[in-house]
Image: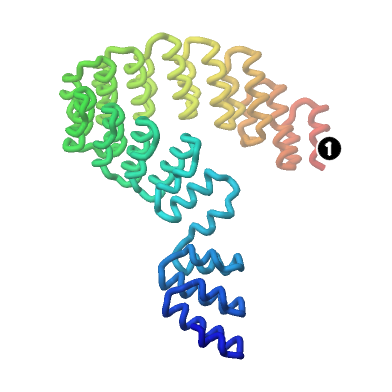
C-alpha cells in the first residue's frame, strides 16, 4: 500500500489504493482516495464483497448511499424517510424480514401492531408469539391462518373458543367432516358436522339450546326448507329462520309465522320494500308500518299512481309529493293518478322536465296549463 503514495497522478494513485482495499477487504483504505466517485465505487464494491450494507453508510452522498443499499438488496433504506416511529419500525421489519425490528417501539400497543402487520404481510406466524398478550397473539394466529389457509395454525391458538372460531372461519362455507372433528367444543363440532354432512340429526345432539336453534336455522337455509324452522324453540332464531326463507324463496307468506305482531309487520314491510311489492303492504296491521311501506314502494317504483292505494289523505299527499318530486316517473303514469290536483301536478312537472308542451295540454286546470306552457317555451 505504501507504494501507492509514491504515485504522482491522483487518478492512478486511487486505482492503486482500490487494488489494496479490495485485496485486503479494508474499507478504511477507500477513505484515503482523492476523488469522491472513486471512494464511492470502492466502498460499494467492498459492501457487496463483504455482504455488509453498513459499509454503504460511509459514503457521503445520500443518493449513493441509497443506491449502495439497494445493490445489496436492502430496501429498508426507504423506511428511514418515514417520520412516524411506529411506521418506520413496521416498514423496517418487513423490509429486513425481521420481526425483531418491532422491538424498538417502547409502546406495547404499537409494538404489537407492528408484529401483527409483519405476520400478516409475510404470512409469518412466528411473529404472533412475540405479541405481548395472549388474546392478541391468538387473533394474530387466526388472521395468518385465514390469509394462508393453514388450519394447523388454528391449533396453536391458546383459547379453545378462539381456536374453534378460527377453524370455522377457515372453512368459510366449505365445511368438511374432517375439519369439523378438529373443533374441541362438542356442541360447535356437532353444528359443524350438521352443515358438513347436511344432516340435522347432529343438531339433536347439541346441548346448548341456542346453539341447537342456530343449527336448525342453518339447516333450513341449506335445504331452503321451512320444516327446520318448526324445530326451533327460541322466538329470535325462529323469526330469523322464517324471515330469511321468505326472502330466499320470494314468498312473503312465511312472515305470518313471526311473533309478535310488530315483528310480522316488519317482515312484510321489508319484503314489500325489497321486492317493490305494494300489495304486500296490505298484510301489515299497524298503520305506522303499512302507510310508510306503501309510500316507499311507490317512490322506489317511480309510480305516482301507486299513491292512490295509500288510505290516509295526509300520507297519500305525502306520497304524491315524494314520487313527483323525484322526477323519475313515466308521464304516462299520470293519467292513473286519481286526485285532479296531483294529476295536473304530475303532468306539469313532467312537461317542464322533458320540455314537452304536449303534456301541458293534459293539465286540466286552465291557469296551471297556461303556466306550464310558458314554462316549456
Task: Name the foreground residue: 185 vs 100.
Answer: 100
Spot occupied by residue 276 in the image (x, y as percentages of width and height) = 49, 29
Quadrant housing the C terminus: top right
Question: In the figure, is residue 257 to the left or right of 185?
Answer: right
Spot occupied by residue 205 in the image (x, y as percentages of width and height) = 16, 20
Task: Name the foreground residue: 119 vs 189.
Answer: 119
- How is the structure coloured here? rainbow
Q: At 67% across and 35% down in the image, what residue appears? A: 327
Spot occupied by residue 38 in the image (x, y as percentages of width and height) = 56, 79
Q: At 70% across and 32% down in the image, what residue appears? A: 347
Compared to residue 130, the image places residue 338 above or below, namely above
Residue picked out by circle 1: 374
Q: Could you say whether the residue bearing mark 1 is in a helix, strand or loop?
A: helix
Spot occupied by residue 84 in the image (x, y as percentages of width and height) = 58, 45
Compared to residue 286, the image places residue 40 above or below, namely below
The image quadrant of residue 150 is: top left
Q: At 63% across and 16% down in the image, what residue appears? A: 315
Compared to residue 148, the image places residue 329 above or below, namely above
Amino acid at each position: 500500500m505504501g507504494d501507492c503514495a509514491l504515485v504522482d497522478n491522483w487518478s492512478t494513485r486511487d486505482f492503486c489504493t482500490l487494488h489494496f482495499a479490495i485485496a485486503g477487504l479494508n474499507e478504511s483504505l477507500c477513505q484515503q482516495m482523492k476523488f469522491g466517485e472513486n471512494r464511492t465505487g470502492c466502498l460499494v464494491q467492498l459492501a457487496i464483497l463483504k455482504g455488509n450494507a453498513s459499509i454503504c453508510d460511509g459514503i457521503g452522498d445520500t443518493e449513493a448511499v441509497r443506491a449502495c443499499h439497494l445493490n445489496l438488496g436492502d430496501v429498508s433504506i426507504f423506511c428511514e424517510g418515514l417520520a412516524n416511529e411506529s411506521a418506520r419500525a413496521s416498514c423496517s421489519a418487513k423490509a429486513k424480514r425481521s420481526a425483531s425490528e418491532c422491538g424498538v417501539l417502547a409502546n406495547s400497543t404499537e409494538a404489537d401492531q407492528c408484529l401483527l402487520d409483519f405476520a400478516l404481510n409475510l404470512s409469518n406466524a412466528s411473529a404472533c408469539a412475540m405479541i405481548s398478550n395472549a388474546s392478541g397473539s391468538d387473533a394474530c394466529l387466526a388472521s395468518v391462518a385465514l390469509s394462508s389457509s393453514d388450519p394447523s395454525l388454528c391449533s396453536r391458538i391458546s383459547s379453545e373458543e378462539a381456536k374453534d372460531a378460527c377453524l370455522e372461519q377457515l372453512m368459510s362455507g366449505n365445511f368438511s367432516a374432517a375439519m369439523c372433528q378438529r373443533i374441541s367444543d362438542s356442541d360447535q363440532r356437532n353444528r359443524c358436522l350438521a352443515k358438513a354432512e347436511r344432516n340435522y340429526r347432529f343438531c339433536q345432539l347439541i346441548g346448548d339450546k341456542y346453539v341447537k336453534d342456530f343449527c336448525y336455522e342453518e339447516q333450513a337455509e341449506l335445504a331452503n326448507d321451512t320444516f327446520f324452522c318448526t324445530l326451533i324453540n327460541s322466538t329470535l332464531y325462529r323469526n330469523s329462520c322464517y324471515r330469511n326463507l321468505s326472502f330466499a324463496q320470494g314468498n312473503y307468506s312465511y312472515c305470518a309465522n313471526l311473533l309478535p305482531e310488530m315483528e310480522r309487520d316488519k317482515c312484510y314491510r321489508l319484503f314489500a320494500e325489497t321486492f317493490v311489492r305494494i300489495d304486500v303492504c296490505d298484510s301489515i296491521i299497524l298503520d305506522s308500518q303499512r302507510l310508510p311501506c306503501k309510500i316507499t314502494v311507490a317512490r322506489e317504483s317511480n309510480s305516482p299512481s301507486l299513491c292512490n292505494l295509500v288510505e290516509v289523505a295526509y300520507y297519500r299527499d305525502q306520497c304524491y309529493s315524494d314520487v313527483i318530486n323525484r322526477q323519475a316517473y313515466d308521464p304516462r303514469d299520470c293519467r292513473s293518478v286519481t286526485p285532479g290536483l296531483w294529476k295536473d301536478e304530475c303532468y306539469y312537472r313532467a312537461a317542464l322536465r322533458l320540455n314537452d308542451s304536449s303534456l301541458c295540454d293534459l293539465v286540466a286546470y286552465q291557469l296551471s296549463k297556461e303556466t306550464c306552457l310558458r314554462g316549456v317555451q
